[in-house]
Amino acid sequence: MRCPDCGHPFSRVLRAEDKATHEGEEYISRRRECRRCRHRWTTFETQDLPDLDAAFRIQEALHILDQAKAKLALSQPM
Ligand SMILES: [Zn+2]
């Protein structure tokens, strides 16, 4: 879900709001915040969209793991 303001690809969900049904499709409105510029906006999403936030969390966790490994490597005596 790209930020409409700066185009940053990752946003976090502040809260999932009510479900709405339109032409047989169920939508969830979500309040989102850009991870870069903190711009906030509301989206209407169908439930079967890929969860980019989950993808981001996995990426973030891997990044933290990499950093931890790098630190460990640095702290080991040569
Ligand atoms: Zn932004």
Image (cartoon, rainbow, N blue to C red):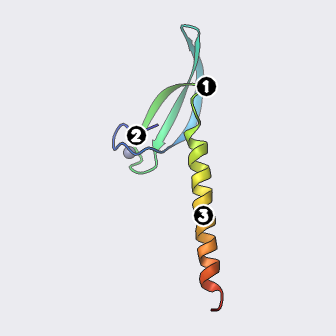
Q: Residue at x 60, y 77 (%)?
A: 71
Q: Residue at x 47, y 42 (%)?
A: 33
Left or right of 1: which side holds 61?
right
* Residue wearing tag 1: 47
Q: Splitting the image into four quadrants, where does ligand 1 fall?
A: top left
* Residue wearing tag 3: 64
Q: Quadrant of residue 53?
A: top right
Query: Please, is residue 65 above or below residue 54 in the view?
Result: below
Which element is circle 3 on?
A: helix
Q: Report the residue that reaches farthest toward the left.
A: 5
* Residue wearing tag 2: 3
Front in this rendered view, residue 17 or 11? 11
Q: Position of residue 65 (x, y in %)?
A: 63, 65
Dot 3 amino acid type? Ile
Query: Please, is residue 51 above or below residue 64 in the view?
Result: above
Ligand 1 closer than 8 Å to the CB at disc 3?
no
Q: Is the residue under label 3 in contact with that under label 1 (CB below 8 Å)? A: no
Which element is circle 2 on?
A: loop
Dot 2 amino acid type? Cys
Measure the alpha-carbon separation of dots 1 and 2.
19 Å
Q: Is the residue under label 2 in contact with that under label 1 (CB below 8 Å)? A: no
> Looking at the rendering, in which quadrant would you find the C terminus?
bottom right
Which element is circle 1 on?
A: loop
Dot 1 amino acid type? Gln
Q: Position of residue 49 (x, y in %)?
A: 57, 29
Q: Residue at x 62, y 51 (%)?
A: 58
Mark 2 closeness class: few <14, some 14–19, many ≥20 residues within 10 Å: many
N-terminal-most mark, 1 or 2: 2
N-terminal-most mark, 3 or 2: 2
